[in-house]
Amino acid sequence: MGNVRFAAILALLISVGVAAWPSVTQKSVVQGVTVAVTPGNVEEGASVWDFAVVFDARGRKFEDEVMESFVLEGDGHTVKPLAWEGQKAAVGHRAGVLKFIAIRPRPKDLELRLVRKGEAKPRVFRFGFGDWSA
């Protein structure tokens, strides 16, 4: 009975398109600063895509200009953020939602790039949609 229930739930999720977009949090740690990114609404029909972003540095102050530090790339298009809905400068922890105008048509792969002062290279968070859409 457990396998039947699992199969039914999986079929339901696929039928409504949950498997069509990435939903796993990605983390990057550089020089003691952790950045975690989780895609939110990145559906095919959405006009604005959003990503939850969390910075954690245990006591250090974050003065990053979030709107200037991130870009979203896909299929040769580069998009700057539309809005940051979250904390401004903070000590130790900073969180919010980063919004972008959706890239049309939706690429099979997205890269969210973060450039921070004092870090040798950008942090890259990659999300794949696969070969089909819901």
Image: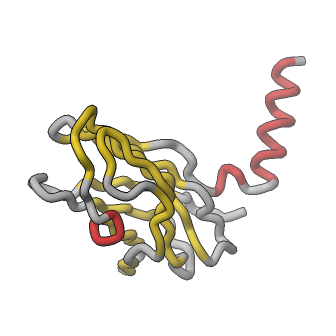
| Extreme residue toward the right, this view | 1
Q: Position of residue 57 (x, y in %)?
A: 27, 37
| Extreme residue toward the top, this view | 1
Q: Position of residue 120 (x, y in %)?
A: 9, 54
60 lies left or right of 20: left
93 lies left or right of 107: left
The residue drawn where x is 55% and y is 52% is 22
Q: Is residue 103 above or below residue 24?
A: below
The residue drawn where x is 67% and y is 64% is 133
Q: Which quadrant of the rendered structure holds the C terminus?
A: bottom right
The residue drawn where x is 55% and y is 58% is 130
Query: Total number of numbered labels?
Result: 0
- Residue 27's quadrant in the figure? top left
Residue nearest the observer in this picture, 113 or 52? 52
54 lies left or right of 61: right
Q: Position of residue 91 (x, y in %)?
A: 30, 43
27 lies left or right of 97: left
- Residue 122's quadrant in the figure? bottom left
Colour scheme in use? secondary structure
Q: Position of residue 33 (x, y in %)?
A: 24, 40
Q: Which quadrant of the rendered structure holds the N terminus?
A: top right
The residue drawn where x is 64% and y is 63% is 132
